[in-house]
């Protein structure tokens, strides 16, 4: 799992795999989920990630591995949700 953050666009991309994107699902005005041909999540793009974004919806609608779910829950699963938690781009291997 890799995280990249574009400071200019205020956009977070969470890359789950290097598979080819087959479809992109827009969940709200600033949250898009890329999936491969069999429906596994390739990546999640979140515009303005300091806002509350639909993590629970992503986890219920899309196929994610147990390790990926654990990392996402650790970072954003609290209530209230934490903003983008890194001061600089970070790569996490899950």
Image (cartoon, rainbow, N blue to C red):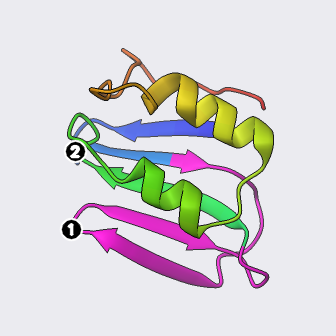
| Residue 32 percent coordinates (x, y) | 41, 66
| Residue 17 percent coordinates (x, y) | 75, 55
- Badge 2 is on which residue? 48
Q: Crowdedness of circle 1 by 10 Å Cα count: few (<14), some, many (20+)?
A: few
Point out the tag, 1 or 2, that comes first from the N-terminus: 1
Q: CA distance from mark 1 to mark 2?
A: 10 Å
Q: Answer whether residue 35 is magenta in the image.
A: yes
58 in relation to 68, above or below: below
Quadrant in the rendering for residue 6? top left
| Residue 75 percent coordinates (x, y) | 49, 25
The quadrant in which the N terminus is found is top right
Which residue occupies the foreground of this view, 81 or 24? 81
17 in relation to 38, above or below: above
The quadrant in which the C terminus is found is top right
| Residue 14 percent coordinates (x, y) | 54, 46
Quadrant in the rendering for residue 12? top left
Label pair 1/2, CB-CB below 8 angstroms: no
Which residue occupies the foreground of this view, 91 or 40? 40
Which residue occupies the foreground of this view, 41 or 52? 52
Residue 9 in view in this figure: yes
What SS does tag 1 mark?
loop
| Magenta residues, start to end | 14-39
Residue at the spot 22% in from the left edge and 44% down from the top edge: 48
- Badge 1 is on which residue? 29
What SS does tag 2 mark?
loop
Q: Answer whether residue 61 is magenta in the image.
A: no
Residue at the spot 77% in from the left edge and 36% down from the top edge: 67
Question: Would residue 87 be found to the left or right of residue 57 on screen?
Answer: left
Residue at the spot 41% in from the left edge and 18% down from the top edge: 86
């Amino acid at each position: 799992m890799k995280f990249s953050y574009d400071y200019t666009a205020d956009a977070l991309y969470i890359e789950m795999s290097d598979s080819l994107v087959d479809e992109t699902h827009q969940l709200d005005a600033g949250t898009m989920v890329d999936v491969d041909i069999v429906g596994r999540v390739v990546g999640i793009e979140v515009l303005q990630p300091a806002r509350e974004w639909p993590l629970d919806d992503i986890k219920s609608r899309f196929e994610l591995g147990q390790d990926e779910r654990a990392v996402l829950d650790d970072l954003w699963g609290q209530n209230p949700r934490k903003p983008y938690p890194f001061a600089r781009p970070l790569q996490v291997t899950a």
